[in-house]
Image: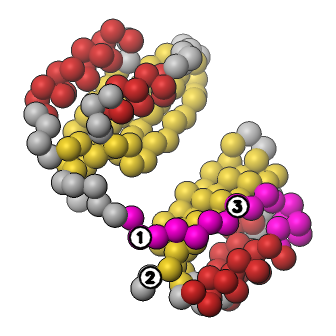
Amino acid sequence: MKNFLVVSALGEDRPGLVTELTRAILDCDCHILNSRMLVLGNEFAIMILVQGNWNTLAKLEVQLRRMEQALGMTLVLKRTEERKRRGQALPYAVEVISVNQPGIVYSLADFFTTRSITIEDLATHSYHAPHTGAPMFSVNMAIGIPADMHIAMLREEFMDFCDELNLDAVMEPMKG
């Protein structure tokens, strides 16, 4: 049986945090399956899915708790199971760019949720347009569309929805 641990850590950004966390994982004979790491404001955030046997994950949990204060990070550790597939889902990528305005992520999430489409991954980024300096916002999503859904109809509904909100969007099958 495979054993998994989700490690979530948040703390003031400084060089070496990734090295220290990943060294602990390696030293405990565990390995990283998936991870996301980024700096938000002055804080470093990391989420890692770690795999190991029961004993090595228990050792890692103890090691990370010992390191928590020294790292100056808040850690959340949670055992989990291998993800179960929920029926046949078609993997699609969604990219949205717009002038930054409140409610973009909520509106997109609501659009997909009301159609039983899962959001597998979501990343946002605020920036200023190169020539005008206008505040811009981008959203990149990976979604799972139920296999029995009519894609052309969904795409048309999505593009109409984005037009109403003045969002520039693309929805296309994920490649490889």
**Residue 17 appears at what percent x and percent y?**
75, 66
Image-based side of 16 in relation to 4, left or right: right
Question: Is residue 135 among the parts visible in the rendering?
Answer: yes
Instruction: Give the residue displayed 45% in from the left and 33% down from the top.
Output: 139
On residue 76, which mark appears?
3
Query: Could you say whether the residue bearing mark 2 is in a helix, strand or loop?
Result: loop
**Residue 94 appears at what percent x and percent y?**
32, 36
Query: Could you say whether the residue bearing mark 1 is in a helix, strand or loop?
Result: loop
Earlier sequence position, callout 2 versus callout 1? 2
Q: Amino acid at mark 1?
A: Glu
Question: Is residue 23 among the parts visible in the rendering?
Answer: no
On residue 130, which mark appears?
none
Earlier sequence position, callout 3 versus callout 1? 3
Q: Amino acid at mark 2?
A: Lys
Q: Is residue 70 magenta?
A: yes
**Tag 2 near tag 1, CB within 8 Å:** yes
Instruction: Give the residue displayed 58% in from the left and 70% down from the top.
Output: 79
Residue 5 figure quarter: bottom right
Quadrant containing the N terminus is bottom left
The part of the chain drawn in magenta is 67-83
Q: Which residue is mark 1?
A: 82
Q: Which residue is mark 2?
A: 2
Q: Residues within 10 Å of mark 2 (few under 14, many from 20)?
A: few
Q: Amino acid at mark 3?
A: Val
Image-based side of 148 in relation to 5, left or right: left
Q: Nearer the viewer, residue 77 or 156?
A: 77
Instruction: Give the residue displayed 69% in from the left and 43% down from the top.
Output: 40
Mark 3–mark 1 distance (CA, rounded to whole Å): 19 Å
